[in-house]
Amino acid sequence: MEFVELGSSGLRASVAGLGCGGSSRLGLGQGRSMEDAAGIVRAAFERGVNFLDTAMAYGTEPAIALAGLPRADILISTKSQIFIDGRLIGPDELLANLDASLARLGTDHVDIFHLHAVRPEHYGHALMLRETLERARRSGRIRHIGITETGPRDPEHLTLARATLDPAWSVVMVAHHMLNQNSRGTVFPQTLENRIGTLVMFAVRAIFSRPERLGEALAELARAGLIDSADPAQLDFLMEEGGASSLMDAAYRYARHTPGADVVLFGTGNVAHLDDNIRSICAPPLAERAVRRLEERYGHLVGVGLDLPDHLKTKRG
Ligand SMILES: NC(=O)c1ccc[n+]([C@@H]2O[C@H](COP(=O)([O-])OP(=O)(O)OC[C@H]3O[C@@H](n4cnc5c(N)ncnc54)[C@H](OP(=O)(O)O)[C@@H]3O)[C@@H](O)[C@H]2O)c1
């Protein structure tokens, strides 16, 4: 496993980070038990993963507690939304959410506490709440404060375009993948300049893990005249000249080696997938020619494949 420094935080994180949300939620999304989910956390740790990303909203915090890993050897990142049931929450509710997360995680501190999926119109409120989190940081319950964007509702990264100018956010989480690369223009140059750590989400999601979803996305882009063809074979060059063993392998390697990307989060409830994903994230970059081709062909696309996780799609329509 390779490790990276997350910006100027001093945190040393594995480049492959276990994402405990998404459609899988460590397998809970497919009906598996909390003990099974804890088994995925343990399996990741045994393979060198020290970075665990969860959230109040995922329901997977107890799996981290149940995994029983040595606290000093893992980095726990969790989150609270700030817009819940159609209203913005206040400082007291945020602190109550933090304390409830600590209780579910069975720990007295988290390494990163993020404001979760902050919409651009709520960024001012997030800044107000950050003051509250600063106090929690001074009390030792939080080591670093982070912010995550909402891929589906903020495809232009408007929240992070502002947040990454402000190093008081130690870490940010950004939606970035082979057909959705616009964070290269705004987010990553600013995180590098301001020494803010980055966590990449959506590296694969459904678009590269479910062939029918890729087919739909390409057909939509071709209909809109944004790409020349709807044929999924247009991505075969990633295997033929890029050196990837599969589209998923290409997707994780592309995300991992984008300049400015620190930790690539991968979500799974399946140990065989976990092995494949760690192997891909730790593999060398794709051939330079293939990366250039990806960026020339698809660099103009915005908001592709940023689907809500399955359980929220049915809830919100
Ligand atoms: N706004 C936010 O803060 C936010 C939003 C989205 C995500 N996140 C974070 O980012 C993490 C990563 O996002 P993500 O969950 O969408 O992860 P992802 O790694 O982009 O995609 C995971 C999906 O691909 C499947 N998959 C994974 N490895 C596979 C393999 N080797 N072969 C075939 N299918 C595979 C998984 O199903 P299986 O279970 O079958 O493997 C799952 O459905 C989340 O877990 C969460 O921690 C945060």
Image: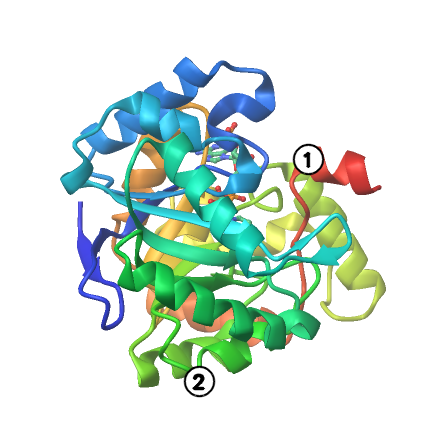
- Say which element carries label 2: loop
Instruction: Tell me if residue 171 comes above or below residue 207 in the rendering.
Output: below
Residue 165's tag is: 2
Residue 235: horizontal and vertical position, in percent?
A: 56, 54
Residue 310's tag is: 1
Q: Nearer the viewer, residue 126 or 250?
A: 126
- Say which element carries label 1: helix
Identity of the residue furthest to the front in this view = 92
Instruction: Tell me if residue 45 comes above or below residue 119 in the rendering.
Output: above
Ligand 1 under 8 Å from disc 1 Cβ:
yes
The quadrant in which residue 210 appears is: top right
The amino acid marked with disc number 2 is: Leu
The quadrant in which residue 227 appears is: bottom right
Tell which circle, 2 or 1, labels the residue nearer the N-terminal end.
2
* Residue 172 visible somewhere in the drawing: no
Distance CA(mark 2)–CA(mark 1): 33 Å
